[in-house]
Image (cartoon, helix red, strand yellow):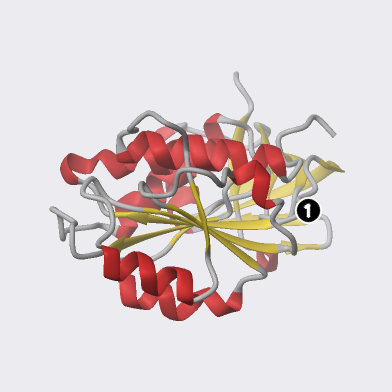
Amino acid sequence: MEIRRFFVSPSDIQGNTVTVRGDEFAHMTRVLRYKVGYSAIVCANDGIEHSCTVKSISKDFAELSIDSSHIADVKGVNLTLYAGLLKNNKLDFAIQKAVELGVDRIVPFTSANCAENKFSQDRAQKIALEAAKQCGSAYLSEVGKLVTIEDVIGELQSYDDVLFAYECEKEHRIADCKPKGKRIALIIGPEGGFTADEASRIAKAGASTVTLGRRILRAETASIVACAILLDTLGELDCK
């Protein structure tokens, strides 16, 4: 049987015992039909993989014993992607790929040119969970609640560096900016882009404006391309 990956909270690991609860417990027992003696990989969003064996299954939780642990990934930066809300669930694809690339937090937002206003945080978080499992990540990316562009601008001061992909920028690339610090934010707009006023306010809040090249990218493509370039620039896509 394929050894599956499960995510738990740090508090669910006590000594040599891991407790799997909630949706992950339901997935383990009702979907995958795990039984006592089965093997699993458990992660608590700290870069460590625990190889475990199921030792008991009760009505609401399962207890696993840790057989071995190792550091699977060490992150040098924490990246938040602010992504404009997209039509027809296109943001789902961007979230999935951002998780695969190693983005730590994805926050959807609405702005003047957004053509959509509905968003399910719970559904998006499930997409992020499945993406983390599929790509073998030791981290579980967080999907935030839907916010406004005003909320985004208000949060920018909490980051060490902020990059803002703007269609009117023609010179400065992500690699040229050489972002510094541990907490980095990246802002990608919706299908209609940003208004001049929004762009001005984002720049005044301290964001560095960057271009993604001479071709016009779809919004979901822009999120993926920008995240990949930025993470590579930061040295987060190497094999170390």
Residue 202 occupies quadrant: bottom left
Residue 38: where, in percent of width, then height? 65, 31
Residue found at x 41% / y 44%: 95
Q: Is residue 38 visible?
A: yes
Residue 234: where, in percent of width, then height? 73, 46
Residue found at x 25% / y 62%: 195
Query: Which corner quadrant holds the N terminus?
Result: top right
Q: Is residue 13 above or below residue 35?
A: below
Residue found at x 68% / y 37%: 232
Classify mark 1: helix, strand or loop: loop
Residue 45 occupies quadrant: bottom right
Please give left or right for residue 121 compared with residue 19 in the image.
left
Query: Which corner quadrant holds the C terminus?
Result: top right
- Mark 1 nearby-residue class (10 Å; few <14, some 14–19, many ≥20): few
What is the total number of numbered labels drawn onto the structure image? 1
Residue 108: where, in percent of width, then height? 35, 59
What is the three-letter code of the residue carrying label 1?
A: Gly
Q: Is residue 44 above or below residue 127?
A: below
Q: Looking at this view, is 6 or 151 the one in front?
A: 151
Q: Looking at this view, is 82 or 211 the one in front?
A: 211
Q: Which residue is mark 1?
A: 76
Residue found at x 72% / y 56%: 77
Residue 238 occupies quadrant: top right
Residue positioned most to the top = 1
Residue positioned most to the front = 171
Q: Is residue 145 visible?
A: no
Q: Is residue 220 above or below residue 24?
A: above
